Image (cartoon, rainbow, N blue to C red):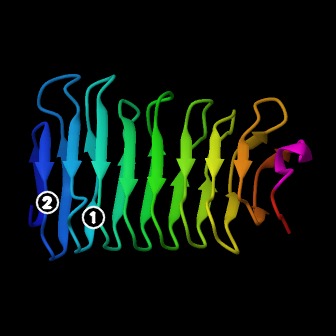
């Protein structure tokens, strides 16, 4: 992986200490999926996109750098684990079921087009943010240990009382746009301001 390569294959391993820019990871055989194994990498890893056929799973594991992953493909079911560092995960369009994001220690920024009933987000230690850009119909979010973990409702409709978003370890909820209906019992156990 070097500067802006498009990588095709079922598995890519990175152990480098230098920064790596991957323009795109592409599945070769339908439903084979894509695996990025970079837990040992200490440089910054950037993944600009992932392509799979319907039902394809992208398993992406990054190391201790300040990593950036972007996925805008409704065929892709994601299983993302990022290590230490202030990572940026942007999932503007992913498969409706089965996806997960687990970020490690650091001030991470996660942006999601919509939260469905099966998306699981575990933000880890640090002052993390989760920005929702679409309608929310459920899901599970644990913002991890931090002092200003924030959920930002940016656009869309949030009928959280009819399709509850299970939230833990949230210190702030920022409603910047859209319509929001909350059942405040969802925030019990959180120290929200």
Q: Which mark is residue 14?
A: 2
Dot 1 surroundings within 10 Å: few (below 14), some, or many (20 or more)? many
Earlier sequence position, callout 1 versus callout 2: 2
Secondary structure beneath disc 1? strand
Which of these two is toward me, 182 or 15? 15
Tell me the quadrant of the picture where the N terminus can be found: bottom left
Q: Is residue 170 magenta?
A: no
> Could one spot residue 50 in this view of the protein?
yes
Part of the protein shown in magenta: 182-189
Q: Where is residue 111 in the image (x, y as percent from the top left)?
A: 53, 56
- Give me the residue at 44% from left, 37% from top: 94
Quick check: 1 above or below 27? below
Circle nearer the viewer, 1 or 2: 2
Left/right placement of residue 163 relative to residue 181 reads: left
Left/right placement of residue 84 relative to residue 130 reads: left
Residue occupied by mark 1: 46
Kindly indicate whether the residue at mark 2 contacts the one at mark 1 (C-beta within 8 angstroms): no
Q: Where is residue 115 in the image (x, y as percent from the top left)?
A: 61, 40
Tell me the quadrant of the picture where the C terminus can be found: bottom right
- Give me the residue at 61% from left, 60% from top: 144
- Give me the residue at 19% from left, 74% from top: 19
Residue 38: quarter of image: bottom left
Secondary structure beneath disc 2? loop
Q: Where is residue 114 in the image (x, y as percent from the top left)?
A: 59, 41
- Give me the residue at 63% from left, 52% from top: 142
Whole-number angstrom distance, CA of label 1 to CA of label 2? 12 Å
């Amino acid at each position: 992986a070097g500067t802006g390569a498009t990588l095709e294959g079922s598995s890519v391993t990175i152990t480098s200490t230098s920064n790596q820019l991957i323009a795109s990871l592409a599945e070769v055989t339908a439903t084979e999926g894509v695996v990025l194994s970079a837990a040992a990498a200490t440089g910054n890893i950037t993944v600009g996109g992932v392509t799979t056929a319907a039902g394809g799973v992208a398993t992406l594991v990054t190391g201790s750098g300040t990593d950036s992953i972007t996925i805008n493909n409704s065929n892709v079911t994601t299983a993302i684990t990022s290590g230490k560092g202030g990572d940026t995960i942007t999932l503007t369009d992913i498969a409706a079921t089965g996806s997960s994001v687990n970020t490690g220690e650091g001030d991470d920024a996660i942006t999601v087009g919509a939260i469905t009933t099966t998306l699981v987000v575990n933000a880890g230690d640090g002052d993390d943010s989760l920005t929702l850009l679409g309608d929310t119909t459920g899901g599970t979010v644990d913002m991890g240990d931090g002092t200003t973990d924030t959920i930002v409702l940016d656009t869309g409709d949030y009928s959280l009382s009819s399709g509850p978003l299970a939230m833990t370890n949230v210190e702030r909820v920022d409603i910047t746009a859209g319509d929001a209906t909350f059942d405040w019992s969802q925030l019990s156990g959180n120290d929200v301001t």
